[in-house]
């Protein structure tokens, strides 16, 4: 088992580029990760990594071994899943990611209940509004609001979620209420944008009389945290484009007001996204089933005013 652990560490180091990140992913110290890579190199009689002060990159031998090592780990994972399916006792670790708002409201709070039901399944949750690279970072399943663009992944739709444009009464009293989407691309209004380094040009897709249309909205500042955007809107700094379930309590108590109700944003799909190899993993199916039911129920309760 130690040899397999060494292989796993090496694969994570190659994927993440340094010992610290690999150690955090595997919950071991950088020193332990370094020792395991050295043990692997000693066993193989070859140097697998080029070491610099900032990054580790695979040597030619390392690249060759990495491709084979990934197949070994995938085969072991599939074998364990097959045994779990036969025994009826799923076990192992699931690495999960979700956006901050969605993750905090719907996913994180359900993990203890899921573990109580399936105590031999461990869940490692990572919340980020960044577009996490599932394959590179060895994520088993990502819960996302959006469309699937990577054909190497599979998607299971959970539900369509209504989106709204909203702003605080104070902002609308100060800047006026927009009457047409074109006003969002001028200096008349400030749009609060969710954006992160490397993101594509930003736009909002809104319904119009002529069908869905892109509007290249503008605003004085942006962030990569969806909850920060909501807090800015509540403080009167601009207009937000959010899933309705995230802001429904504020709409209900009057802290926010829907703007351009005749030109709402296009709905977004809430879905579970995962690599094709995980399709038959029993523990993954259990988690996706559990979270799908939970998300549908809680979002329904929020929109019905029961939460």
Image (cartoon, rainbow, N blue to C red):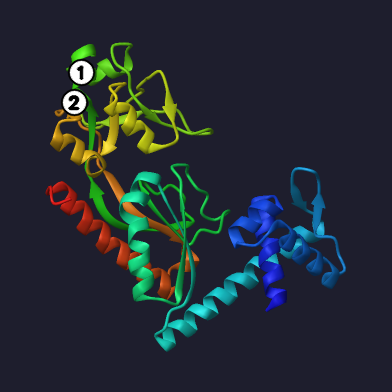
For the residues marked 2 and 1, what is the alpha-carbon distance in whole angstroms? 9 Å
Splitting the image into 4 quarters, where does residue 40 fall? bottom right
- 207 w.r.t. 121: above or below: above
**In the image, 124: left or right of 204?**
right
What is the crowding at mark 1: few (fewer than 14 residues within 10 Å), some, or many (at least 20)?
many
| Residue name at image x 81 percent, y 50 percent | 51
| Residue name at image x 31 percent, y 33 percent | 230
Residue bearing the label numbered 1? 172
Image coordinates for residue 175, horizontal then vertical, percent: 23, 12
- Going from N to C along the chain, the mark reached first, 2 or 1, is 1
Image coordinates for residue 50, horizontal then vertical, percent: 81, 51
Quadrant assignment for the N terminus: bottom right
| Residue name at image x 35 percent, y 56 percent | 107
Question: Which of the labelled discs sits on residue 140, or is there none?
Answer: none
Image coordinates for residue 178, horizontal then vertical, percent: 20, 17
Mark 2 falls on what kind of element?
loop
Mark 1 falls on what kind of element?
helix
| Residue name at image x 47 percent, y 69 percent | 122
Viewer-nearest residue: 145 or 235 = 235
**In the image, 44: left or right of 275?**
right
- 96 w.r.t. 266: above or below: below
Residue farthest along the bottom direction in this orientation: 87
- 116 w.r.t. 146: above or below: below
What is the crowding at mark 2: few (fewer than 14 residues within 10 Å), some, or many (at least 20)?
many
Tell whether label 1 touches label 2 (CB within 8 Å).
yes
Residue bearing the label numbered 2? 259
């Amino acid at each position: 088992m130690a040899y397999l652990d060494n292989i796993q560490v090496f694969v994570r180091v190659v994927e993440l580029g340094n010992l610290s990140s690999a150690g955090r992913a595997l919950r071991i110290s950088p020193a332990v990760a370094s020792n395991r890579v050295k043990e692997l190199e000693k066993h193989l009689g070859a140097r697998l990594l080029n070491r610099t002060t900032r990054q580790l990159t695979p040597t030619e031998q390392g690249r060759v071994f990495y491709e084979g090592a990934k197949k070994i780990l995938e085969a072991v994972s599939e074998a364990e899943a097959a045994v779990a399916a036969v025994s009826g006792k799923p076990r192992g670790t699931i690495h999960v990611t979700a956006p901050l708002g969605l993750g905090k409201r719907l996913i994180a709070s359900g993990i203890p209940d899921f573990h109580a039901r399936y105590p031999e399944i461990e869940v490692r949750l990572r919340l980020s509004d960044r577009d996490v690279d599932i394959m590179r970072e060895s994520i088993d399943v990502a819960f996302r609001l959006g469309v699937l663009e990577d054909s190497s992944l599979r998607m299971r739709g959970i539900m369509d979620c209504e989106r709204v444009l909203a702003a605080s009464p104070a902002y609308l009293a100060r800047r006026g209420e927009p009457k047409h989407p074109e006003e969002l691309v001028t200096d008349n209004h400030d749009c609060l944008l969710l954006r992160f380094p490397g993101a594509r040009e930003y736009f909002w897709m809104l319904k119009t009389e002529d069908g869905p249309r892109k509007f290249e909205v503008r605003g004085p500042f942006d962030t990569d945290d969806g909850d920060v955007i909501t807090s800015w809107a509540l403080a009167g700094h601009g207009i937000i484009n959010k899933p309705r379930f995230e802001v429904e309590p504020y709409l209900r108590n009057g802290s926010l007001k829907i703007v351009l109700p005749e030109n709402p944003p296009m709905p977004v799909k809430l879905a579970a996204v995962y690599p094709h190899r995980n399709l038959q993993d029993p523990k993954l199916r259990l988690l996706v089933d559990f979270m799908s039911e939970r998300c549908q129920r809680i979002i329904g309760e929020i929109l019905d005013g029961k939460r």
